[in-house]
Image (cartoon, helix red, strand yellow):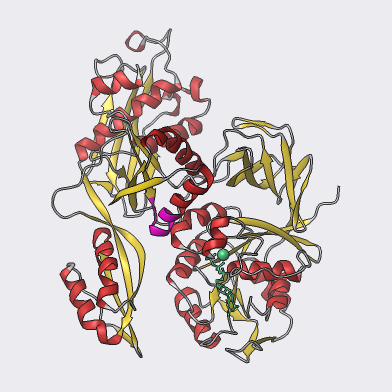
């Protein structure tokens, strides 16, 4: 069978840089559509949701496909607004290459840097498109400078722009790229930079050619073992789940069976559309029907790589209630479905108080959830009391061991775990102590020691969703220090029933939480780097307000009539400043907040009510999880 050359391409940028407009232009240039649609009129291919069209912003990532010569490009248009960063997160792992769009007027923006860092970490070969050269204020030379200063010096301008700031603005290529450059670009070592306008089409032909030649399109290997990843879940008109899946190797066939269900229909992206097929091959993106239990981020077949978090977590949560109390149950179901499509939206149920809370990246996401509940589910919901989501870090080291056949351990295994603090931002890492003999693990249940360790890792992560004060525990290393189990015919001291996976799963929270209790934990709140762009004559009052919030700002960089103040502020204070800024600046102030990390709270640590049984309260825990 003839295998096509494929390229899975991401379009990433700060909000409003022109990703969706560029996507339209690329589709138009490829002959897939007869006319380039407009974001402002709500007529683009990828902003297809009613909410996207009303607001003129992208909310969900969307896949479209088009040919460039013999290469099939599957393009994924992503949202740029930081509230929808979770959409970008899942897309990153399925890309072969990327076009990072930077506005020729606004230049490198906070989200541009955040995305760039993630692309570099994942080693995604990336071209840059400096867009909007037709707009007043376009300054491609300055922007190129910013790219070199703030992103990477490894850039190669592919031409020059003229007629700046007018509809006639044009891009003139320097000439065809030599093969050495092309090879280094495909390897992600060099980053070619194009200039143009997605609105007028300037530079689009050149960037199209660049996509095919300077990014690593490949013929997939359909023969290897299946490895595919679900990066997006859509809902069909009948509420059916459609899983957008990228195949890394092997072949996926209709009627294939997985834990999540059986594939009933398979469609593959091809030349501007999807076509129904019996098979999808490595390199392709398929839409799969029939996988009723599938979740975003799931792997089909072989798993490649673990759970990754490239961006800051949501930092707020809000209690959501149905305006009509009779809708409570429907609201629960609806929020559950929304969280399925976007697993980084956490939904927490507090059954005793009958409350549901949703974690949030920001105001715009809250509005979108509210509108989605109204439009798609006919539900009027209220968001109350937005609070900051904190985390807990171990205050020191702690260790706990549970021995078999003792009153505090009804589970059929010995388990020892040590908790130690680790670098901020490192998450929860699971290790195995050198002294552990792999044969002491219950391999009859887990098959291999590696599989056992992977499960332990998962059990620890789940247990640490709620720490001593109810917040997620992070930035620590958890080490397995002891494991043993009983055998039906083992030595007398160990005689007893074989453990099941369930035993180990239920024992882990007991041990790891006791280790944490010994270490103690510090509750930490999110901190943001604030950039406030304010009219120069209002610097005084704004600096004063920042001072009263307990922070100091750097001396502003005057940019003519506007000045930029920078400071680090805790989450609660950011909200405060956001509220006060319009009054202080006559409505002219603009605030950019970038999450930079967590810091211990001052004073009494806030407590979040647990939603799962507390392993430190043994009777309650055993009563709820069972023995
Ligand atoms: N003058 C000019 N305007 C542009 C150009 N490209 C996009 N725009 C405008 O910029 C605005 C944002 O464009 P989009 O294509 O929605 O930007 P985006 O990056 O997809 O935005 P999000 O997906 O919401 O992050 C719209 O009003 C576009 O018409 C351009 O090259 N020149
Ligand atoms: Mg868009």
* Numbered circles on residues, count: 0
Look at the image and tell me whether residue 566 can be seen: yes
User: In which of the image's four quarters is ligand 1 placed?
Assistant: bottom right
Look at the image and tell me whether residue 433 can be seen: no
Q: Quadrant of residue 409?
A: top left
Q: Is residue 278 above or below residue 29?
A: above
* 332 is within the stretch colored magenta: no
Residue 111 shown left or right of residue 550 in the figure: right
Q: Is residue 48 above or below residue 109?
A: above
Q: Quadrant of residue 32?
A: bottom right
In the image, the segment drawn in magenta is 360-367
Q: Quadrant of the C terminus?
A: top left
Which percent across, then down, holds residue 580?
25, 69
Residue situated in front as seen by the camera: 443 or 265: 265
Q: Is residue 294 above or below residue 150?
A: above
Q: Residue at x 69, y 76 (%)?
A: 204
Q: Is residue 129 above or below residue 610?
A: below
Dominant SS type (magenta): helix
Residue situated in front as seen by the camera: 233 or 456: 233
Residue situated in front as seen by the camera: 436 or 350: 350
Residue 50 shown left or right of residue 202 in the figure: left
Which percent across, then down, holds residue 180?
69, 75
Q: Residue at x 65, y 67 (%)?
A: 23
Q: Residue at x 25, y 31 (%)?
A: 400
Which percent across, then down, holds residue 224?
72, 42
């Amino acid at each position: 069978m003839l295998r096509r050359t494929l390229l899975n391409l991401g379009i990433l940028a700060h909000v409003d840089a022109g990703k969706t407009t560029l996507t339209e232009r690329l589709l138009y240039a490829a002959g897939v559509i007869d006319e380039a649609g407009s974001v402002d009129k709500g007529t683009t291919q990828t902003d297809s949701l009613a909410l996207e069209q009303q607001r003129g912003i992208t909310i969900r990532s969307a896949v479209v496909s088009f040919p460039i010569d013999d290469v099939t490009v599957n393009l994924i248009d992503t949202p740029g607004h930081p509230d929808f960063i979770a959409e970008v997160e899942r897309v990153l792992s399925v890309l072969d290459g990327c076009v990072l769009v930077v506005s020729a007027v606004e230049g490198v923006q906070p989200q541009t840097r955040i995305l760039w860092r993630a692309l570099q970490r994942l080693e995604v070969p990336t071209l840059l498109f400096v867009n909007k050269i037709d707009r007043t204020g376009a300054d491609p030379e300055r922007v190129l400078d910013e790219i070199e200063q703030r992103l990477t010096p490894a850039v190669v301008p592919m031409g020059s722009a003229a007629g700046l700031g007018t509809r006639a603005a044009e891009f003139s290529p320097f000439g065809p790229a030599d093969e050495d450059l092309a090879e280094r670009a495909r390897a992600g070592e060099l980053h070619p930079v194009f200039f143009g306008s997605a609105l007028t089409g300037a530079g689009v032909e050149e960037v199209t050619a660049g996509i095919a030649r300077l990014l690593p399109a490949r013929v997939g290997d359909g023969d290897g073992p299946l490895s595919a990843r679900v990066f997006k879940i859509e809902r069909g008109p009948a509420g059916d789940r459609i899983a957008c899946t990228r195949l890394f190797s092997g072949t996926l066939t209709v009627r294939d069976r997985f834990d999540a269900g059986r594939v009933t229909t398979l469609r593959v992206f091809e030349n501007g559309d999807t076509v129904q097929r019996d098979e999808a091959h490595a390199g392709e993106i398929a839409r799969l029907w029939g996988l009723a239990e599938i979740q975003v981020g799931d792997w089909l077949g072989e798993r490649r790589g673990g759970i990754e978090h490239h961006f800051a977590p949501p930092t707020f949560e809000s209690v959501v209630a149905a305006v009509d109390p009779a809708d409570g149950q429907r609201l629960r179901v609806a929020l559950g479905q929304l969280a399925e499509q976007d697993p980084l939206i956490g939904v927490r149920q507090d059954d005793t108080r009958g409350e549901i809370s949703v974690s949030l990246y920001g105001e715009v996401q809250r509005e979108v959830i509210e509108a989605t509940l109204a439009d798609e589910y006919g539900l009027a919901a209220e968001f109350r009391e937005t609070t900051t989501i904190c985390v807990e870090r171990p205050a020191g080291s702690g260790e706990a061991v549970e021995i078999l056949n003792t009153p505090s351990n009804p589970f059929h295994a010995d388990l020892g775990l040590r908790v130690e603090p680790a670098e901020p931002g490192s998450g929860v890492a699971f290790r195995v102590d050198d002294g552990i003999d792999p044969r002491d693990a219950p391999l009859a249940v887990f098959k291999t020691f590696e599989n056992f360790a992977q499960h332990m890792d998962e059990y620890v992560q789940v247990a640490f969703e709620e720490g001593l004060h109810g917040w997620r525990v992070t930035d620590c290393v958890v080490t397995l220090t002891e494991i043993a189990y009983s055998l039906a015919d083992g030595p007398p001291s160990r005689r007893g029933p074989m453990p099941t996976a369930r035993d180990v799963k239920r024992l882990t929270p007991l041990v790891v939480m006791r280790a944490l209790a010994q270490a103690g934990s510090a509750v930490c709140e999110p901190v943001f780097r604030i950039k406030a762009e304010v009219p120069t004559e209002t610097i005084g009052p704004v600096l004063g307000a920042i001072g009263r919030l307990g922070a100091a700002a750097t001396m502003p960089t005057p940019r003519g009539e506007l000045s930029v103040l920078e400071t680090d502020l805790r989450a609660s204070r950011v909200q405060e400043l956001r509220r006060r800024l319009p009054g202080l600046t006559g409505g002219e102030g603009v605030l950019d907040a970038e999450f930079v990390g967590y810091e211990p709270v001052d004073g009494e640590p806030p407590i979040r009510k647990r939603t799962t049984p507390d392993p430190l309260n043994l009777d309650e825990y055993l009563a709820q999880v069972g023995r």
